Amino acid sequence: MILVTKDDFDTPAVVQGVRARTAGQAGALVTFTGYVRDYASDTGTRSLFLDYYPGMCENELQAIADQAAARWNVQDAAIVHRAGELALGEQIVLVVVASAHRGDAFAACEFIMDALKTRAPFWKRETLADGSSFWVEARESDLARTRRWDEDGQP
Amino acid sequence: MTDAVITILYFARIAELTGVRNECVPADGITSGHTLLHALKTRHPALAGVKNLRLAINQTHAPAGAAIAPGDEVAVFEPVTGG
């Protein structure tokens, strides 16, 4: 299940959906939730705005989920990503992976998050407590994490 | 001719620099990401100083060397920062 939404999402409902679709099959279910945190070191974060590419976002998230399913035992996966205005502390992203065993569930969930960070077309603009705002720059460390999945299959 | 154009989409900081979120540019002379970016930097001088311009052609990430044809939808953006 892939969803890009401007509204907050109901994590228990998404998890329940994955459970329902894998009834009796999945021995392990891993969830990852990302929240709006304070990015800047000195002046506090007030809010985030997420620009996004409708259509390509959903396609790219589906492609990432498909790659995870081709590589690990994934019985069902859900990826939910917010767009638009978000306040400090709000949920940005949710990944749920159900597998036969925990190893596959953990690996697939981490792979999906790493791939999402470098491939899904979202861009964060942070607004600080003093009203100033800036576009967040991509981190080399995120790219490096994604590359390591290509090289040796490890995060 | 309506098909002799390329549809360009700009996102995030790049949309702020160009002042538009989308536009159509004549396809004449544009055959690749390289030739497109060259044309766009002439059209929008503010783009000339941007180091990391990335492209998606028809909603798929593409290197600057990728081929571009009339009718394509090309997105221009900086490295993504979701998650």
Image: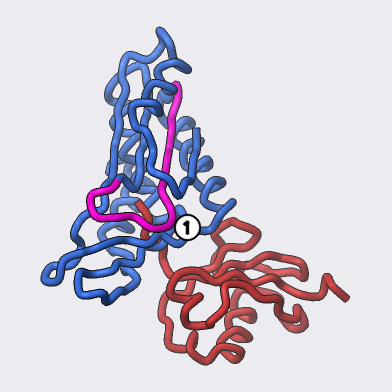
| Residue A59 location (% of width, % of height) | 56, 46
Residue at image x 84%, y 73%? Answer: B2
For label 1, the residue is A121
Q: Which chain is red?
A: B
Q: Residue at x 43, y 45 (%)?
A: A7
Q: Position of residue A10 (x, y in %)?
A: 37, 33
Front one among B62 and B65: B62
Q: Which residues are magenta?
A: A75-90
Quadrant assignment, res A48: bottom left
At horizontal 47% and vertical 46% (from top left) the residue drawn is A5
Q: Which x, y percent locates residue A20? A: 44, 15
Residue depicted at 18% across the width and 67% down the height: A40
**Residue A113 part of the magenta-drawn span:** no
Badge count: 1
User: Callout 1, which amino acid?
Assistant: Pro
Looking at the image, residue B42 lies above or below residue B34: below
Q: Would residue A37 be found to the left or right of residue A113 on screen?
A: left
Relative to A53, residue A78 above or below:
above
Main SS, magenta region, reads strand
Colour setting: by chain
User: Chain letter for blue?
Assistant: A
| Element on which disc 1 rests | loop
Rendered view: B58 above or below B55: above
Residue in front for this viewpoint, A114 or A55: A55
